[in-house]
Image (spheres, grey):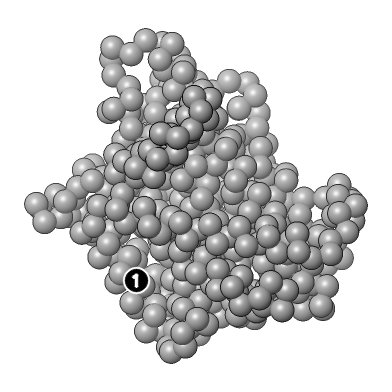
Amino acid sequence: MAPAAQLEVEVTMNAVRKFSPPSLRRAINLLGPGLITGAADDDPSGIATYSQAGAQFGFAMLWTVVFTLPLMAAIQIVSARIGYVTGRGLAANVKQHFPRWVLLSVVGLLLVANTLNVAADIAAMAEAMRLLVGGSAHVYAVTFGLLCLTLQVFLPYATYVRWLKWLTLALLAYVAVAFTLHVDWPEVLLAIVWPRLNDAHEALLTVVAVFGTTISPYLFFWQAAQEMEDTGRAKSPANTAADVRRHLRRIKVDTIAGMTFSNLIAFFIILSTAATLHTAGVRDIQTSAQAAEALRPLAGEFTFLLFSLGIIGTGLLAVPVLAGSAAYAVAEAAGWRGSLTLRLDQGEGRGFYGVIAAATVGGVVLCFTPTDPVKELFWSAVVNGMIAVPIMAVMMLLAGRREAMGDHVIGRRLRWLGWVATVAMSATLVATLVTL
């Protein structure tokens, strides 16, 4: 975990630790990179994709977030273990253990996906701001892009994220809304166990999008980088094998908690939009306004405000993760020094921050294309699903290599779940192409 991000977690949780019983304090101490990664996964791209899934197919898409939870947790644990055990990020490990064309392919695919995702997130943030105060979405897109870039470069990440992180609590509005509605819970359970989908091609495309926004490549690189940077503080040659095993257990608990929170929010987003938009006959979300407006008659203006602020808050939190994970990958591939703790005013990390600037500015430029923001978010998720497959395969091969992982190669259960996740993602892509 990056030192700045680690500091942010410590600062925000110190007060809770002080007044918590010892058992709760121990539980909080286990949380860190996995929890932050899980929260960043519910970015505007995820919100739009889950909303579209619920509106178009109702409860029939709820099974996807239940099915992906163990697979998502497994693949994130693999990435975290690689970062911690090797003390290097994913790109650095690929560079050391695979041919150069594999490295360039992985990093290139990540850059494409992240730039699209940055564009989609900034566009959604701009649209949410327009809903709240009026004005031009394009002006807001440029403003948000410049704001994110300035804060990433010149403001300590711990300070930046400390306040914005609270806005992500607005996502809990979907949980609240779900319990204010009349929901036929037996029907929900039946839809999870036996989903009924009519349009095979559209259903498969939505599954790819949900998988892509849930199991996203940038999360692999980000969590590995966080654990890599934490290695300097948490791991040293003096550490015993028991110390390493204890930290690996901490990674497991932290990641499972973070991914469970992420998928729980996704579950209620699909549930809420299924019970509102789908029930009302609205099967296609044309603008992000429709997702927010659906809450107005059911939960009032306050929930509408929370949802809109949530899009802005999660976007401001996710854009640095997207641009930062791309910067880590490029810096490792090029042999540069890369860290969010570097200070540009001291001449450090020019290449690293240059990649962040390129990804952010590129995302802003793409916001001026005539694509609808929600459609852009949806298709960025589809692209994520497509490029995740080769990256996941490389990660699984790497995590099973003793020359890379030493005595800490992944076990049979984690290897099985990781490959199931990879095969499941591949199968949905193949099925989508077949039904074209």
Tell me the element at label 1.
Answer: helix
If the image is split into quadrants, where does the N terminus sit? top left
Residue 126 is situated, as x and y percent measured from the top left of the image, at: 45, 77
- Drawn side of residue 191 relative to residue 295, left or right: right
Task: Tell me the quarter of the picture where residue 84 sits.
Answer: top left
Residue 373 is situated, as x and y percent measured from the top left of the image, at: 54, 76
Residue 388 is situated, as x and y percent measured from the top left of the image, at: 55, 49
In the depicted view, which residue is nearer to us: 342 or 353? 342
Would residue 430 be visible to someone looking at this image?
no
Amino acid on which disc 1 is placed: Gly
Please name the residue shown 60% across and 46% down the image.
Answer: 261
Using the image, determine if residue 77 lies above or below residue 352.
above
In the depicted view, which residue is nearer to us: 363 or 187? 187
Please name the residue shown 61% across and 77% down the image.
Answer: 301
In the depicted view, which residue is nearer to us: 311 or 102? 311
Please name the residue shown 21% across and 43% down the image.
Answer: 337
If the image is split into quadrants, where does the C terminus sit? bottom right
In the depicted view, which residue is nearer to us: 293 or 245? 293
- Drawn side of residue 265 relative to residue 325, left or right: right
Would residue 314 be visible to someone looking at this image?
yes
Using the image, determine if residue 220 lies above or below residue 132.
above
* Residue behind mark 1: 145
Residue extending farthest front: 19
Residue 159 is situated, as x and y percent measured from the top left of the image, at: 29, 53
- Drawn side of residue 94 relative to residue 342, left or right: right
Using the image, determine if residue 56 lies above or below residue 230.
below
